[in-house]
Image (cartoon, rainbow, N blue to C red):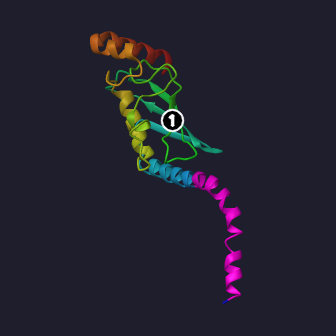
Amino acid sequence: MRSDSPSSAAAPTPPLPQAAPSPRQSPIMTALRRIQKELKDINNNPLEGLTVETAEDNMFEWKCAIKAASNSPYKGGTFHFTLTLPENFPFKPPSVTFTTKIYHPGINEEGHICVPVLRDQWKPTVTLSSVLATIQDKLNNPSPDDPFEPDIAALLKTDEAKFLATAKEWTKKYAQ
């Protein structure tokens, strides 16, 4: 028994130095496993009108595109955006930046989109498929509520025809 005591006392000492790097690597590995699962789910159940590609060397950055619905003010347009996943995903939400200019009350000049699931309503159980569906819905159905662009939201409320004409003009100019 005495020979076991020194062994068991010595055994915890070597794992401690190994345990220090693990917490830094573990979140990245957890994130990568989750990202791979999410991509598989998206590929097996694609969202109509939405494409997703990852860089071969960076699974944390997705290049996405939404083909606007035929009943959307943006019909005929394809809108590109980057979805960037943090290293501590799924514990922190992805960030989304549109690279195609769009005249939209919920998407600002810098391309950031205003959706609660990417802010205060984020939970680790939220799937990226549902995030993409939310972004697609937000793009196709502009709403003056909770806007990133108050002037565009005000125009949508007060002069919908002018808003629709401007959205159509920008779609032709930037998204076709």
Residue positioned most to the bottom: 1
Residue at the (44%, 28%) spot, across then down: 113
Residue at the (49%, 54%) spot, across then down: 37
Q: What amino acid does circle 1 point to?
A: Ser
Quarter of the image where the N terminus is located? bottom right
Q: Is residue 154 above or below residue 70?
A: above
Q: Position of residue 50 (x, y in %)?
A: 44, 37
Is 73 displayed left or right of 15 in the figure? left
Give the prevailing secondary structure in the magenta stretch: helix
For the magenta stretch, what is the residue range? 2-29
Q: Position of residue 156 (x, y in %)?
A: 31, 15
Q: Is residue 115 above or below residue 3?
A: above
The local secondary structure at tag 1 comes to: strand
Residue at the (51%, 35%) spot, across then down: 95
Residue annotated with mark 1: 95
Q: Position of residue 161 (x, y in %)?
A: 30, 11
Is 101 displayed left or right of 12 in the figure? left
Circle 1 crowding by C-alpha within 10 Å: few under 14, some 14–19, many from 20: some
Asked where in the image residue 46 lies, by quadrant, the reply is: top left
Q: Position of residue 107 (x, y in %)?
A: 44, 24
Asked where in the image residue 136 lies, by quadrant, the reply is: top left
Residue 15 colored in magenta in the image:
yes
Front-lying residue, 144 or 26:
26
Front-lying residue, 156 or 29:
29
Q: Is residue 9 above or below residue 132?
A: below
